[in-house]
Amino acid sequence: MLVERIMRYGVYGDIHGNLEALDAVFAFFETKNIDHYLCVGDIVNYGPTPKERTAKVKESESLVVAMYPHFFSWKKMK
């Protein structure tokens, strides 16, 4: 018997300087049994915690599907 399973994607972006909102988004995703995360860009640019934001995105193993100019700032932080 073949059993189909629906894959659930959590899509987020435009994070910029709001680590608290990013935490809230991932807390929401946890309640929805998300299988994969898609980040649509604007991870860094301004705000007080760029390293913390990029670390959280990396930890989530998100697929970054859009690379805005700010993405290159993330690359430099590695």
Image (cartoon, grey):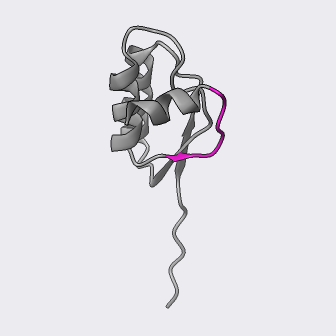
Q: Quadrant of residue 71?
A: top right
Quadrant including the C terminus: top left
Identify the residue shown where x is 40% and y is 49%: 61
* Residue 5 horizontal side relative to residue 58, left or right: right
Quick check: 4 above or below 38? below
Residue 49: say if magenta: no
From the top left corner, tell me how far across and down residue 57 is, in percent: 41, 36
Q: Quadrant of residue 54?
A: top left
Numbered circles on residues, count: 0
Quick check: 61 above or below 76? below
From the top left corner, tell me how far across and down residue 58 is, in percent: 38, 41
Question: Quick one: which residue is furthest to the top in this view?
Answer: 48
Quick check: 26 above or below 47? below
**42 or 22: nearer the viewer:** 42
Identify the residue shown where x is 53% and y is 60%: 7
What range of the chain is rendered magenta? 63-69
**42 or 10: nearer the viewer:** 42
Identify the residue shown where x is 54% and y is 49%: 9
* Residue 20 horizontal side relative to residue 40, left or right: left
Identify the residue shown where x is 54% and y is 75%: 4
Residue 65: say if magenta: yes
**3 or 17: nearer the viewer:** 17
